[in-house]
Amino acid sequence: MRRPTVRARLVALTAALAAGTGFVGTALAHGGSLRAASGSMSVPTWLFLLTGGGVVGASFLLASFVTDRALIRAIHDWRRVARAPLAKLTTATRLASVAALVVVVAAGFVGPDDSLRNLAVLVVWVGWWAGYAATVYLVGNTWPALNPWRALADWLPSLDRDYPEKLGAWPSVVGLLGLIWLEVISPLADDPRLLAWVVVGYSAVTLAGALAFGPDPWFGHVDPVARVFRYYGRVAPLRYTDDGLQLRPPGAALAEPKLVDDADEVAFVVAVLWVTTYDGFVGTPLWGEVARPVVNAGVPAMVVYPVALVAGFGLFLWAYWAAARYARRTADTYLTVGAIARRFAPSLLPIAAGYHLAHFLGYFLSLSPALASALSSPSNPPLNPSMLVLPDWFGGLAVAFVLLGHLLAVWVAHASAYEVFPGRLQAVRSQYPFVVVMVLYTMTSLWIVSAPGAEPPFV
């Protein structure tokens, strides 16, 4: 049976997201009390854009001088392994994570209505998605040992039905875009009760899927959270293997072959990059200027948001595949466009990680006192939780995180090129289109980071 084309999948994706609009209430502009707490930056936009594009371009030129394959391979093959019986701790960590999941749901239902005092809201958004997610790409992926849904699925029986191989990773693409759409369109960061119901719904769907197909197929193919953390973990320097705890240069694992096996996994990598960009874009003044006239013309906000989400994803995916097509021409290679796209897709992950850190570190630091207060007294947190006020120079760190992510991406693409192409000039020329795309991604990310916070355009 012939697999659906990328265009057909995008059409199906649009329909799936549009079908969900009926389950969400009033659209908010992703602002909320938690979003407003993260602060803004005061670095000139032109400095962000010119510096970012110039640094990425210059880094490619510098990397082009490193043409010794043995040296590149030695850098990526360097590793240190320490014996660490961490597998013995998995049972304890999973028990703790399941208990934490129960506490989060309970706090969402019975805790304070104020999002800055509610343990569920602070743990999910500040502690988990902002703080913990950063440790996955900065340190290592500990999610397999902490995933409460995987723990419950392993403890429950399974029907072990065959997973439809033709679906591949596309359900995880739909799931990731759907979760981000739900986060943006609904007041999940402000309504603890709604957040608790979403966690309960996510738990029900996840456990039902694992019951039907088994934990390995479900968390390997379908679950978007597990796949995001699995890919982010390849950026990190630490990785737990059968040999023990392995230390490697950051991003070294991204240059390994067959990390991305098909077009569906390419789409997921691009989706990881896009959703963080979209998450920041809908909080900029430009989004309000573009979306408000459309809504005023009678188009429901719940239609505008998912259309923008899918359209932006399609644009990012098209740009990446266009780069792969031009890379085949510039490299003058017999490799197919698909093979090139699969081989270079992992180099986008450091960009996503760098932008995630730039977007969420200030958010995490500013709200960490409120999180600590809620953890110390879940049932009766302080009425006026304290927050850190970040200095103006903190915006410079956000620039640095974005740029470091792109610099690592350039190096990973460079190392991958020298593994794929036999000729040195061929390897360098193959990177031209991808560097152009990376520069555009860089300038887009830096523009969003530098944009001032906007008031919600829809209420």
Image (cartoon, rainbow, N blue to C red):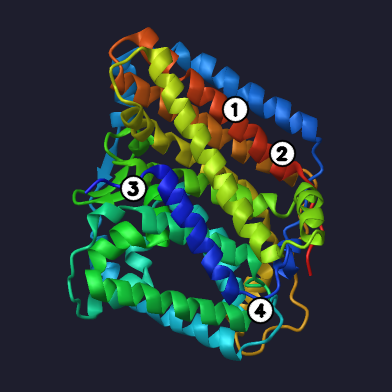
Q: Pointer 1: what residue?
A: 439
Q: Secondary structure at mark 4?
A: loop
The amino acid sitting under disc 2 is Trp
Q: Pointer 2: what residue?
A: 447
| One can see residue 94 in this view | no
Give the mark, 2 or 3, whose residue is nearer the N terminus.
Answer: 3
Give the percent coordinates (x, y) of residue 125: 59, 67
Say if 226 sits above or below 286 in the image: below
**CA gap, disc 2 and disc 4:** 30 Å
* Image quadrant where residue 171 sits: bottom left
Q: Pointer 4: what residue?
A: 191
Discs 1, 2 touching: Cβ within 8 Å = no
Say the numbered circle drawn on residue 48: none
| One can see residue 227 in this view | yes
Mark 4 Cα shell of 10 Å, populated few (<14), some (14-19), many (≥20): many
Say if 4 sits above or below 446 in the image: below
Give the percent coordinates (x, y) of residue 368: 64, 66
- Judge from the rendering whether residue 183 lies leftward or rightward of residue 144; answer left or right: right
The amino acid sitting under disc 1 is Val
Q: Pointer 3: what residue?
A: 4
Give the mark, 3 or 1, whose residue is nearer the N terminus.
Answer: 3
Q: Which residue is found at the position 66% from the left and 65% from the top?
A: 302
Give the mark, 1 or 2, whose residue is nearer the N terminus.
Answer: 1
Give the mark, 1 or 4, whose residue is nearer the N terminus.
Answer: 4
The amino acid sitting under disc 3 is Pro
Q: Marks 3 and 4: which is nearer the front?
A: 3
Q: Secondary structure at mark 1?
A: helix
**CA gap, disc 1 and disc 4:** 38 Å
Give the mark, 2 or 4, whose residue is nearer the N terminus.
Answer: 4
Q: Secondary structure at mark 2?
A: helix
Q: Marks 2 and 3: which is nearer the front?
A: 3
Mark 3 Cα shell of 10 Å, populated few (<14), some (14-19), many (≥20): few
